[in-house]
Image (cartoon, rainbow, N blue to C red):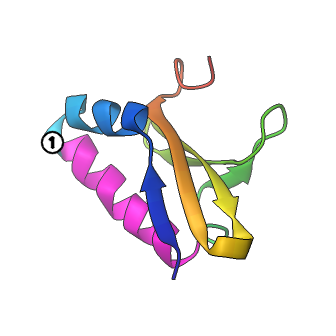
């Protein structure tokens, strides 16, 4: 099982999200802690290091540090804004 490290930017976005969306995101974060690579809707980013996880119209961008078994959640946001 991986340890989750969530950035302040991601925590702020999670607090601002609607309750229904925030609960879905929390469920998916728990899935990431179990296995960050075989979770459905995960793709490796091409222009940035790391991966993205699709949650409805939202995205979770994260980087995995295999050696330490840590998933660093960089940002959470709507798909139109998260890659900027």
Nearer-the-camera pick, 40 or 10: 10
Q: In the picture, residue 57 is in which quadrant? A: top left
Residue underneath mark 1: 19
Q: Is residue 2 above or below residue 8?
A: below
Neighbours of disc 1 within 10 Å: few (<14), some (14-19), many (20+): few
Q: Give how far across and how far down residue 46 sits, in percent.
A: 84, 38
How far across and how far down the image is residue 54, in percent? Answer: 53, 46
* The residue stretch that appears in magenta: 20-35
**Residue 40 visible (yes or no):** no
- Which residue does the image show at 72% across and 48% down from the upper left? 50
Q: Principal SS element in the magenta part?
A: helix
- Visible residue check, residue 50: yes
Q: Quadrant of the C terminus?
A: top right
Q: Identify the residue shown where x is 19% and y is 34%.
A: 18
Q: Nearer the viewer, residue 62 or 24?
A: 62
Residue 30 part of the magenta-drawn span: yes
Q: Is residue 59 above or below residue 53?
A: above
Q: Position of residue 59 (x, y in %)?
A: 51, 39
């Amino acid at each position: 099982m991986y340890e989750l490290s969530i950035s302040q930017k991601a925590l702020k976005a999670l607090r601002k999200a609607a309750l229904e969306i925030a609960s879905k995101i929390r469920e998916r974060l728990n899935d990431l802690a179990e296995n960050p690579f075989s979770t459905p809707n995960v793709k490796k980013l091409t222009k940035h290091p790391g991966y993205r996880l699709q949650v409805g119209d939202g995205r979770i961008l994260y980087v995995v540090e295999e050696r330490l078994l840590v998933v660093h959640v960089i940002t959470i946001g709507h798909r139109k804004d998260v890659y900027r």
